[in-house]
Image (cartoon, rainbow, N blue to C red):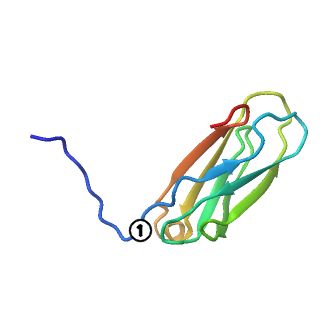
């Protein structure tokens, strides 16, 4: 017998993994701008949750049009290695079911 394959039939899929662009090596106490972007294959609006990796973040930003860029500025107070995480949801699913989560992380000291 073959391995089991689970198939989900739906008229909606999660947005593609978000992208995070910005400088990877920075100095402490200097504001840096990062761009977040997510594309939904059905052009649904998306919302973002951002975690800066230092105990700061923001939730429920948006909604933004699929493919629209969100620019945010952040300053780290201390030297170190931090992981920026972005999670986006389809705005429609956010209000209706709270599903369709994807995440992407980028370390600010190397390209991911």
Foreground residue, 76 or 110?
A: 110
Name the quadrant containing residue 37.
bottom right
Could you tell whether 8 is left or right of 31 in the image?
Answer: left
Could you tell whether 71 is left or right of 99 in the image?
Answer: right
Name the quadrant containing residue 107.
top right
Image coords of residue 3 (percent x, y):
18, 41
Placement of 65 over or under 70, stated as above or below: below
Q: Residues within 10 Å of mark 1 (few under 14, many from 20)?
A: few
Image coords of residue 26 (percent x, y):
83, 35
Foreground residue, 69 or 29?
A: 69
Image coords of residue 82 (percent x, y):
72, 34
Could you tell whether 27 is left or right of 62 in the image?
Answer: right
Placement of 18 over or under 56, stated as above or below: below
Placement of 80 over or under 56, stated as above or below: above
Give the labeled residue for mark 1: 12
Residue at the image position 85 percent from the left and 43 percent from the top: 75
Image coords of residue 110 (percent x, y):
69, 32
Which quadrant does the N terminus fall into? Answer: top left
Foreground residue, 88 or 96?
A: 88
Could you tell whether 75 is left or right of 35 in the image?
Answer: right
Residue at the image position 65 percent from the left and 40 percent from the top: 106
List the single residue furthest toward the front.
Answer: 111
Residue at the image position 49 percent from the left and 62 percent from the top: 98
Foreground residue, 79 or 39?
A: 39
Which quadrant does the C terminus fall into? Answer: top right
List the single residue furthest toward the left.
Answer: 1
């Amino acid at each position: 017998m073959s391995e089991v394959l689970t198939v989900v039939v739906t008229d909606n899929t999660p947005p593609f993994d978000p992208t995070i662009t910005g400088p990877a090596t920075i100095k402490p106490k200097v504001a840096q701008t990062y761009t977040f972007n997510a594309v939904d294959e059905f052009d649904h609006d998306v919302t973002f949750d951002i975690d800066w990796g230092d105990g700061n973040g923001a939730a429920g930003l948006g909604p933004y049009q699929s493919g629209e860029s969100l620019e945010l500025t952040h300053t780290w107070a201390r030297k170190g290695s931090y992981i920026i995480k972005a999670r986006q949801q389809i705005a429609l699913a956010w209000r209706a079911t709270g599903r369709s989560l994807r995440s992407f992380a980028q370390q600010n000291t190397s390209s991911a």
